[in-house]
Every structure is written in structure tokens, then in C-alpha cells.
Amino acid sequence: MYLIRPHNSETEQSLKKRGASPLLARLLSQRKIDDIDGFLNPLQDAYLHLKNLSLVKNVKNVSSLLFEAYRDKKRIAVSGDYDGDGVVSSYMVKRICEILNIECHVFLPSRFEHGYGLNEQTLAALFAFSIIHQVPGILLVLDCGSSS
């Protein structure tokens, strides 16, 4: 048995008028999403959806580091995690660095070769990573477990 999620007809019609396919309009209206551009291009409008950026833990520290990297032309290395949110968070930082014209190299360790979290094997592999060539000015470790 299938349950059909209720949708908002007005939202659905509005989305269709703005170029959404009938299927996409239905799916978005079922999820109470009326901003098709923000949904399809989340990085462009992400700052608009944050109610209070200061509530994000350590956001001031990270923004200071990014500003420092930009100002001093420091290279950033990112060690992410190999799962879905680790890959996405690594991509997001890489994309932000591209927008700010900050040199950034991402390393996603293998669970089988490097284990889990930030450890000696991961750091050795990160710094041996052929693109980096030098110790980065800033190392960001993303989504590598709370014990790391």
C-alpha cells in the first residue's frame, strides 16, 4: 500500500509557472518547498536560509581562518571523511575556497587504508598526497568523528 503525501496546489502551480516540471513541482510542494532556485542551487542562497549564523558552533573561528587564508594567501588542506556527509562537507569547503580564490586541496581517506578519524596514517597520507607538495598553512578536518 502506498501513501501519497499531501501537497499544496497553489505552491505546485506557482512552481510550474517558474519552470519546474510537473513531477518536480509536485515533489517540492509535498515537502513545503516553494523556492525552486534555492532548492536547485543551495550554495548560492545558503546564507539566506540560515536564521542566525552566530548559532553555528565555531563559525567565528572558521571564518577568521578563512579570512586569514585569503589575506595571507595560505593554502588550505582539507581532510574529510569517506561517508556521505564527509564528502559533502569537504566539497562545500572546497567550493567556498574556489569562490574566494584560496588554494585548497581535499583528501578523503580510505577506511581500509587509513582507518577511522584523524590519525597518523591519515596525516601521513594527506601530506604525501601528490598535489599538496608542502605543509598547508591551515588544515581543516571535517566530519571525522567526535573522538578525533
Image (cartoon, grey):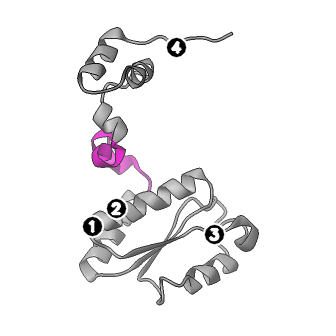
Dot 3: within a 10 Å radius of its alpha carbon, few (fewer than 14), some, or many (20 or more) residues? Answer: many
What amino acid does circle 3 point to?
Answer: Pro
Residue bearing mark 3: 109
Question: Which is nearer the eye, 140 or 38?
Answer: 38
Rendered position, 139 above or below 44: below
Measured as percent of width and height from the top left, residue 145 is found at 64, 59
Dot 1: within a 10 Å radius of its alpha carbon, few (fewer than 14), some, or many (20 or more) residues? Answer: few
Report, in whole angstroms, how far the alpha carbon at label 2 lies from the one at label 3: 21 Å
Callout 3: SS: loop
Q: Which mark is residue 5?
A: 4
Lateral position of residue 2 relative to residue 75, left or right = right
Report, in whole angstroms, how far the alpha carbon at label 3 lies from the one at label 4: 39 Å
Rendered position, 134 above or below 147: below
What amino acid does circle 2 point to?
Answer: Ile
The residue range painted magenta reads 41-58
Callout 1: SS: helix
